[in-house]
Amino acid sequence: MTILEFLFSAPTYDWIRFAGFLVGIILFIAVAEKTRVALGWPPEVNRKLVHILTGVLIFFTPFFFVSNKPLIWMAVIFIVVNYIGVKTEKLKGMHDTQRRSYGTVFYPLTFLVLVVLCWQNHKTILMLSMLVLALSDAAAAIVGENIKHPHEYFLGRDKKSIEGSAVMFATSFLIVCLLLPHLDTLDGLEITWAMACWIGLVTAIVATALEALSSSGSDNLSAPLGSAFVMSFFLGHSAQMHIQFSIGLGLALTIAVVSYWIGFLTASGSVGTFLLATLVFGVGGWIWTVPISTFFVISSLLSKLGKAHKAQFAHMFDKSSRRDIGQVLANGGVAGFVILLYNYFPNPIWFVIYLGGLAAVISDTWGTEIGVFSRNQPRSIKNFQQVPPGTSGGISLLGTISALTGAFTIALCGWIVAPPDFYFSIGRFPFWVVVGAGLLASLIDSLLGATLQAQYCCPACEKITEKKRHCGQENTLLVSGHTWLDNDLVNVCCSFSGAFLAWTGMELFSR
């Protein structure tokens, strides 16, 4: 069978229904657009109607289609059409909102991902996740935009409201709680009302947090996929794992709130930490929790150490010691992704890769936080010439020793908590692979900082900085590097390098 034959292999009646669904959606969009123009409705009203109707139609697709191939093509068509619509500013009833948004592109993209992954054995997850997108997300936006005096907040670029988030939570909970017991037979399951409410509660919490963090319509991707992950975890694991995940969520919430209260995290960083910690604690348990908790706690304390001394370098760094969502994802995003891979493809090597990523970011963090106290002038890793303390790419003996100590600390945590079947002991290669991966990755971070990371000069004070605005929001001028490569992206590269080097080391030394 050729690729084309595979992609188009479906019963004839499925293609007939595909044509009917496609024509029906297009006709509805056209009629709604004409009605909107005739009645003078704002574009946002029409967009919400299309958003809801499309999701409801998708909800019923498992009852009408045998194969998922027509649905895959339907998703691809609307991804392309909607992307062109956003770029050309056509179909204002679908795309014109108060902010530039790619939500209409993320919508069919979410459907494409879910229909590919869930059609075979998890149709229930596909249906409920898309209904959360269609109803909960739309209800949150409608309430938040139409209430007279909403309690507004910002976690990202987009404005959110407490009332809208409350509606998002309540609607998501009701969708899963009320429908899951009636749809479970589609996948050969038996779900009690109590279990459905439990799953609904956890799903609603995660979906609401993801929606609150979203910007530019990304909640059309993050909220339903996050909901799908939670439901798939609960439907695919034992009661013991359900308890572990729920306890992990509670522990993650506690850490996020306390960290925000004592000043370790911003509001966005707190919500991001909650989601990341829920994933790590809930899926990995205490074995995976100890290393990342060690990194977070000690690194946060170090960031507060010597505040008076570090204040002289504050003008150079783009971010403060209080971590936001960008810093949380930059330092922990790779670790979270590895946890996801471990969940779906269990293998002890993922733990070593996970530790490698953490060893990299802790090496970089400790090297920076402690290295600024060096009495000797740091040198650029690019040419080994002396540079001012705090300069990106600057290294010192104290900073390098601190980086090595950080990597060693993470490797030691892994050795202490790893069970015997992970083959991780201080006398075997994995320990030293993690240490080496962490140190080398921190040097890669320094090299990127010295060569490719964006560096700016403030025209007012003529100081070099990572900030795009300086001295009372004065626009700075790029003097080296690339504008798209900021410190957060460099940290992502650092973490990925540590994980990749750990995997490479295991491949080399395990033969």
Image: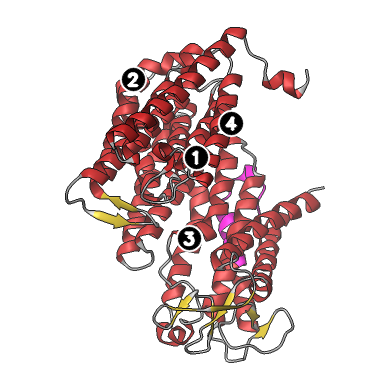
- Look at the picture and state if 337 lies above or below 344: below
Left or right of 13 on screen, residue 278: left
Task: Indicate the amino acid at tag 2.
Answer: Thr
Q: CA distance from mark 3 to mark 4?
A: 30 Å
Q: CA distance from mark 1 to mark 3?
A: 21 Å
Q: Which of the numbered marks, if any, corresponds to residue 326?
A: 3
Task: Indicate the amino acid at tag 4.
Answer: Val
Badge 3 or badge 4: first in the primary sequence = 4
Can the viewer see residue 414?
yes
Q: Give the percent coordinates (x, y) of residue 205.
A: 34, 41
Residue at 52%, 77% in the rendered image: 369
Alpha-carbon neighbours of circle 4 within 10 Å: few (<14), some, or many (≥20)? some
Alpha-carbon neighbours of circle 3 within 10 Å: few (<14), some, or many (≥20)? many
Q: Which of the numbered marks, if any, corresponds to residue 349?
A: none
Q: CA distance from mark 2 to mark 1?
A: 33 Å
Q: Give the percent coordinates (x, y) of residue 420.
A: 62, 45
Q: Which residue is mark 1?
A: 106
Q: Which residues are magenta?
A: 406-425
Alpha-carbon neighbours of circle 2 within 10 Å: few (<14), some, or many (≥20)? some
Q: Nearer the viewer, residue 24 or 506?
A: 24
Secondary structure mostly seen in the magenta stretch:
helix
Badge 1 or badge 3: first in the primary sequence = 1
Residue at 62%, 71% in the rendered image: 453
Q: Does the residue at mark 2 contact the one at mark 1 (Cβ under 8 Å)?
A: no
The magenta stretch spans residue 108: no
Q: CA distance from mark 1 to mark 4?
A: 11 Å
Q: Which residue is mark 4?
A: 76
